[in-house]
C-alpha cells in the first residue's frame, strides 16, 4: 500500500481484488488478506507520515523505514470452496478458480451417474444433479413457474418447476445451491436443445437418505461399534457395526435418515459415517 496512490485505490477496490484472487500469488489465504486490509492501510498511512522525518544520526534515507516492521496478517481460517467461489462471483460476476459442483462431485456421482452433457432426448425420467443458477419466477397460464439453469460443470440445462413444487422446495431452489432432481426431458422450441420439467427435488442430505443403501464407517484401523441409542429414528431399527482394518460397511434396504442427529453415536472412537451405494 506504500507504493500506490490511495486516492485511486481505495479499500473497496482492494477487497474486490482479494475476493477475485488477484493476490493469490502473494498469499493463498484470501480470508486472511481480507481481514488484514485495514491493517495494511493503517501501516501505509503511518509509513507515509514518517517518510520525511529523519534524525541527526540517520545514515541513509531508508533508516527510518527499516525500523517500522510490517504487520503480520490476521490469523483467520481459510474460506471453504463455496464461500471462496461465492466471493469470486460477487467480485467479477462468475466463478474463476473452480466450480461449486467440484465440492460434491465424488459423492453425487455415486448415485447420479449421468452428467448433463451426456443427456439425450428420452421419455424416461432422468435423475440429475447440479447447481441452481439464474432462478426467476414468472406467471404462467397455470400459475407461477420457476425457471432456472441446472449446471453440473459438464454442461447446463434449462429447467422448470411448477408453483406447488417450487413452494415446497423454496429452501433448495435458490441460486448457487446444489439440488438433485428427477424430471422429464422435452425439446426446447426456442433453443433447439433440451428442457427439464422437474418433478421431484432433494438437497444433498435428503438425497443421501433417498439413495444411500449402506453405511461406511472409517475408523482409521481401529474397531468401532456404531449403534442407535434409542428408537427415535423411525426409518431404521437399532443396529451395530463392528469395523476393523480401515472401515466397516453396513447394508440395509431401508433409507437412512437425512439428518441422523444425536441419537447416532460411534462407541469407543470417533468415526466418519457416510451413506454409500451397495457393494456388489
Image (cartoon, grey):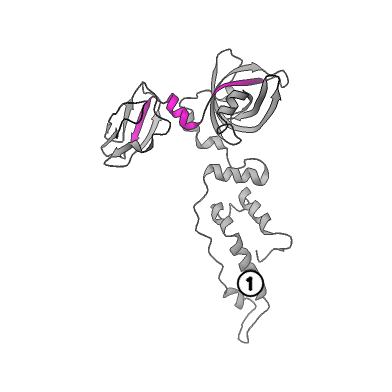
Pick the quarter of the image with the C terminus.
top left
| Helix, strand or loop status at disc 1 | helix
Where residue 266 appears, x then y in whole percent?
30, 38
Q: How crowded is mark 1: few (under 14 residues within 10 Å), some or many (20 or more)?
A: some
Q: In the rendered image, which residue does mark 1 sit on?
A: 47
Q: In this view, does 263 lie to the left or right of 186?
A: left
Q: Residue at x 50, y 34 (%)?
A: 104
Judge whether 73 appears above or below 226 on screen: below
Where residue 155 appears, x then y in whole percent?
61, 28
**Extent of the magenta region:** 193-221
**Would residue 152 be seen by someone viewing this image from the given angle?**
no
Q: Does the magenta segment cover residue 209?
A: yes
Q: Which residue is drawn at 60% across and 60% down?
A: 37
Q: In this view, does 93 lie to the left or right of 84?
A: right
Q: Does the magenta segment cover residue 231?
A: no
Where residue 275 appears, x then y in whole percent?
40, 30
User: Quick one: 266 or 169, which is closer to the camera?
Assistant: 169
**Would residue 208 be seen by someone viewing this image from the given angle?**
yes
Tell me which corner region of the image, top left, top right, bottom left or bottom right, holds residue 190: top right
Amino acid at each position: 500500500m506504500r507504493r500506490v496512490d490511495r486516492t485511486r485505490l481505495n479499500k473497496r477496490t482492494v477487497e474486490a481484488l482479494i475476493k477475485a484472487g488477484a493476490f493469490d500469488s502473494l498469499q493463498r489465504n484470501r480470508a486472511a488478506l481480507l481481514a488484514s486490509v485495514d491493517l495494511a492501510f493503517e501501516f501505509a498511512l503511518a509509513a507515509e507520515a514518517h517518510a520525511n522525518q529523519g534524525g541527526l544520526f540517520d545514515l541513509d534515507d531508508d533508516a527510518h523505514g527499516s525500523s517500522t516492521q510490517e504487520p503480520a496478517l490476521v490469523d483467520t481460517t481459510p474460506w471453504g470452496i463455496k464461500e471462496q467461489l461465492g466471493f469470486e462471483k460477487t467480485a467479477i460476476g462468475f466463478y474463476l478458480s473452480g466450480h461449486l459442483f467440484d465440492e460434491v462431485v465424488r459423492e453425487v456421482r455415486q448415485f447420479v451417474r449421468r452428467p448433463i452433457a451426456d443427456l439425450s432426448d428420452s421419455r424416461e425420467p432422468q435423475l440429475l444433479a447440479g447447481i441452481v443458477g439464474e432462478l426467476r419466477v414468472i406467471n404462467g397460464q397455470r400459475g407461477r413457474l420457476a425457471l432456472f439453469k441446472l449446471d453440473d460443470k459438464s454442461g447446463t440445462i434449462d429447467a422448470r418447476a411448477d408453483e406447488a413444487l417450487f413452494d415446497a422446495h423454496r429452501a433448495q431452489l435458490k441460486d448457487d445451491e446444489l439440488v438433485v432432481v428427477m424430471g422429464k426431458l422435452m425439446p426446447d422450441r426456442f433453443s433447439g436443445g433440451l428442457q427439464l420439467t422437474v418433478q421431484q427435488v432433494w438437497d444433498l442430505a435428503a438425497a443421501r437418505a433417498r439413495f444411500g443403501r449402506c453405511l461406511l464407517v472409517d475408523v482409521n484401523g481401529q474397531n468401532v461399534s456404531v449403534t442407535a441409542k434409542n428408537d427415535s429414528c423411525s426409518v431404521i431399527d437399532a443396529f451395530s457395526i463392528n469395523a476393523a482394518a480401515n472401515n466397516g460397511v453396513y447394508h440395509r434396504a431401508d433409507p437412512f435418515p437425512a439428518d441422523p442427529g444425536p441419537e447416532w453415536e460411534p462407541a469407543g472412537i470417533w468415526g466418519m459415517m457416510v451413506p454409500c451405494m451397495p457393494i456388489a
